[in-house]
Amino acid sequence: MLVVQDGSAVAPIALVAQPINTGGRGLAIVAELSDRWGSTPTADGGKSVWASFDKRLSPERLPVATPRGH
């Protein structure tokens, strides 16, 4: 299990980042590779985002790199 905490009370959202965006991919990657994920509020007003992963990923769940021309 992976757990990450921050001080923001804003609920996490898995965004669809555009190629030009420099951020917004982290939670989308976690959502794609994890079996389940969620968030819980913390006592200090922030949140913990957690994800659980199978011990092994099947080949069809592994991300595929798409080469881009420059």
Image: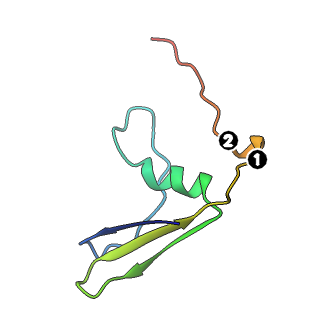
**Residue at horizontal 60 percent and vertical 28 percent from the top:** 65
**Residue farthest top in this picture:** 70
Residue 45 in the image: above or below residue 55? below
Residue where numbered disc 2 is placed: 62
Say which element carries label 1: loop
**Residue at horizontal 62 percent and vertical 61 percent from the top:** 53
**Quick one: 35 or 19, which is closer to the camera?**
35
Which amino acid type corresponds to the residue marked 2 in the rendered image?
Answer: Leu
Whether residues under marks 1 and 2 lie with C-beta atoms below 8 angstroms apart, the answer is yes
Residue where numbered disc 1 is placed: 58
Which of the 4 quarters of the picture holds residue 3?
bottom left
**Residue farthest bottom in this picture:** 43
Q: Position of residue 7 (x, y in %)?
A: 23, 72
**Residue at horizontal 51 percent and vertical 73 percent from the top:** 38
Q: Position of residue 26 (x, y in %)?
A: 43, 50
Q: Which mark is residue 2?
A: none
Q: Is residue 33 left or right of residue 12?
A: right
